[in-house]
Amino acid sequence: MWRRFGDLGFAALVAVVITVEAVPLVWLTWVVLGDLGHHEGLTWILLGGVATAALGLVVVTAYLLAYQTVSDRRAAALARARGEWVARWLRVLAGREPEPAGPLGRDAVGALLELREAVRGAEAERLLELLRRYGVGDGLEGRVRGHRIARRLQALEDLARARAPEAMPTLLAAVIDPDRRVQVAAARAAARTLADVEDPGTREELAEAFAASLVAAALPFGVIEEVLLLADEAAPALVRAILAREDVPAPFVRAALDAVGRLGLLPFGDAAVARLSHPDPEVRAAALRAVARLHVLPEGAREAVRAALDDEVEFVRIHATAAAALLPREEALAALWARLGDPSWWVRRAAADALAGLGRAGLAELGHAARAHPDRYARDMAAQALRDRTERVVAEAVAR
Amino acid sequence: MRALELVQVGLLTYFVVLNLIYSGLSFIGLRTVVVHARELSDLALRDLLEREVYRPVSILVPAFNEERTIVAAVRSFLALQYPRFEVIVVSDGSTDGTLERLIEAFALVEDPRVWSARLPTRPVRRVLRSLRHPELVVVDKENGGKSDALNAAINLARYPLIAPVDADSVLDAQAILRASRVFVEDETVLAVGGTVRPLNGATFRSGRPVSMRVPSGWLERFQIVEYARAFFLGRTGWTRLGTVLIISGAFGLFRRDAVVRVGGFWTGTVGEDMELVLRLHREYRRAGLPYRIVVAPDPICWTEVPSDLRTLLRQRSRWHRGLWQNLWRHRGMLLDPRYGRIGMLGLPYFWLFEALAPVVEVVGLVTFGISLALGVVDPGIFALFLAMAVLHGMLLSQIAVGVEAMLLERYPRISDRLRLLAAAFLEFLGFHQLLALDRFVATLRVLRGRGGWGAMRRAGIPTATS
Amino acid sequence: MGSILAIEDDRTVGLVLEHVLETAGHEVRVARDVADGRGALAEGRYDLIVLDLNLPDGSGLDLLREIRQGGGASTPVLVLSGMRQEEVVVRGLRLGADDYVTKPFSPHELLARVERWLKARG
């Protein structure tokens, strides 16, 4: 999207031009307001204003024309150099070319990191070795600890590609950096790195430290969610580390429970069940979602779902309908029938969808509700859900 | 004579202060763009696309008599790079073949659905669904204006983020992706605006310009310069100051729950995009809730700008009336410290330097004309002053257009860059003054009809191209 | 030995594909986007297509649909994508993809899969 060169030069140039140009403008105001109407020196100030503006315009235009001429060529040259290095590293991997002598230039490092991002398996391991051999990780870690924000973020992005476990301490330190942008970038890099740690012991250990940093940084829900997704196979370790902590804020529990449901982490079913009556409605909803997706509802937890069906918060009731399908069949049908008459449109919709997902008995119940539910809105919703289902079946058949 | 001099001094001061603000804002804007471009993580964008981190988006397309362009527009929206979204087109009582074209092109069938009408709107006649694209919904409703159409679309929207767009716009393939990233990183964000660029002169393939040339008409060239100034420098500058007051109706991404919470789009204005943003500020500040409204430079939306003067003047007049309506409706926020930077910085600026600017400019031209005729002012000084003003304006335009050169998708020819520089100069030989006059007249119209603001006559959705 | 069309916008991945497949003796053409891919399909015949899903000018799934409805109904198509969501994989396979490999990918594994499909085709 953006060319990442020549922009800083342009910004610096503009800063100078604008500052120089402001001098006559400020002076002009001073003179005009100072001695109303006495025009001595006014001509000179105006001339100065014209001169600085003209000079600024010439300089900026010259820069832009030069930029326009060289930038396409420079971008192409950069891409070519990068491509050549990628090809060269591929030959090195295949053993058809000796490893180049260090230290590596920017293109060589960039190509190495891009390759590491593209492949996995034995080649990826070899690439990590190469990164280590040339000390790339150390250089990046040093930059992460530096001062300039753009460089720090770039280094974190590179580390996210490198996925080198030895960088974890630096990354975790960056997760609790005062700057939110650094925190987010570091959390992403740490999650991607953790995903590559295969030894279960190390993974657990790192996950615990990571969870502690995340909690300390109080990152928002979206970022925690992203971290859990990026952690891939290490996600269960991270979920465990988060749910095991006492001090963990609600967004973390929510994100962890969502991961439990999405990844189908059965061992955490109990953790979800335990939070069905959590004081935070968002957490209750997440627990219900997890329970519904895992399809586990121990007998002792049924009461919590029954209570959630009558929760005062609308979105808790919505997710309760999905979990209600796990109640004993007769009870589930009755509960969903009742929710079809909920004052909230969204709950009615969710109840109808849940019924439609309950197989033949559910569909029969929907049909019955469409005709005979005492609530008019419930009848409409049941009819709509039946139509939607028919249409979906038809659409799928057509698409095939 | 003395009075005339005082007026002149006042005008001069106004002009100088305005230009100093422009310069400062331009630098802040430029700096924000550069920082943004440097900090942007391509890897994060790709992860957003490939993993499940995204928030699904409902794209809302209000349409009134758009039979010529609607099918192509919907196709371009359906081709967006985003993992999960739906497109909701609302035909707002169209009297031409808009609906028929859509039914034909996308095999629409009636969908007798029930939905939750949280926002009141004119009656919906029917809802249609496509057999080919499960993510396309078309609403046929009675005419109620653009805001009403948008509210109807919001009622039907299924996803947590909504993106109102203009039917005559083309969204960059990654626009939604880039804007939605902001929501992932900060839960308090209510809305994200993008950059609007004129599409005249460019050819598109699936939301990407494949060839870009500066259009041949000067009017369109002037607007390219104008849009660059407004978006690359102005709005990005304001976002750095935490004071975004407008998110263009051509493209923005909002949290649906926030929009519903404040009551959706207001049907009583022709500037519904700005009004919604002001209302979000007001309601969230009143409730003491943490929130952010931002503009990012790289979710790009391409829009067709008027190529003839009459349409352009009508459009600008409408925009200016909308601006006045909104400022007046939310006048209670002006200089009220409860509204923070919005009340103390953003709104005063808009009153003084946006809404009143054309008045000052027209009055200024007239008094200087009189002064010159009466010999009160030295023609030499006047000429110097004029030269300084024009050069300053050109400089800012050139900086703005320069930001465009940093984008991968830019006008590739040197000759085009020179044409834009020429446009930045020629703009001051009449075009600029004409627009000022147009907005001055709009201001007068607003002043005359103030009592009747609530009951504005609406002729469906006003479109920039007709 | 087969002729293979890779539709892939990422330069690095394109280079890896070229390297791996050409080293194994196949002929490879890399197209950078949907339009480019369409052009390549119109010009030549291929024994196998490697297809990315997120392309700069559209979705690979649309192209897949076109391939299946057009002349290349029997050409094996191997989807190579970073999208690992179950629903996307299922949609790709339903639309007629023969195989689905997620990125990052193992070059050896990809080569083995490619050669299996080429062999099956005879």
Image (spheres, coloured by chain):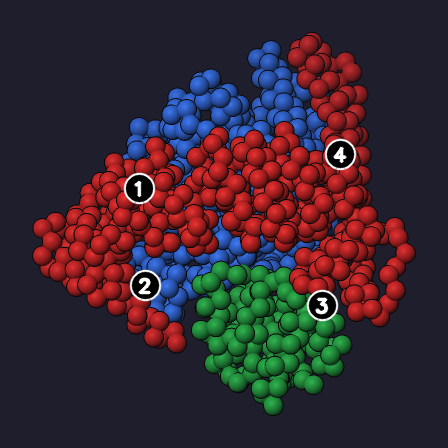
Closer to the camera, B180 or A19?
Answer: B180
**Residue mark closest to the camera, 2 vs 4:** 4
The subunit letter for the residue under badge 4 reads A
The red-tinted chain is A
Q: What distance separates the C-alpha of mark 2 from that of mark 4?
A: 55 Å
Q: Give the image quarter of residue B416.
A: bottom right
Residue tagged by mark 2? B129
SS category of the residue bearing label 2: strand
Disc 4, SS: loop
Alpha carbons under labels 1 and 3: distance apart: 49 Å
How many residues crowd mark 3 within 10 Å: few (<14), some (14–19), many (20+)?
some
Residue type, mark 2 in image: Arg
Distance between mark 4 and mark 3 Cα atoms: 34 Å
Does C23 appear above or below A325? below
Q: Which chain is green in the rendering?
A: C
Q: Judging from the image, what secondary structure is the residue with disc 3 in?
A: helix
Report the residue at 28% width, 44% height from top.
A300
> Label 4 crowding class (10 Å Cα cut-off): few <14, some 14-19, many 20+?
few
Q: Amino acid at mark 3?
A: Val
How would you rate the neighbour count of disc 1 (Cα within 10 Å): few for under 14, some for 14-19, many for 20 or more? many
Q: Disc 1 vs disc 3: Cβ atoms closer than 8 Å? A: no
Q: Residue at x 68, y 71 (%)?
A: C108
Which numbered disc, 1 or 4, marks the residue closer to the eye? 1
| Label 3 sits on residue | C16
Q: Amino acid at mark 4?
A: Gly
Indicate the amino acid at tag 1. Answer: Val
Residue A316 — which label? Answer: 1
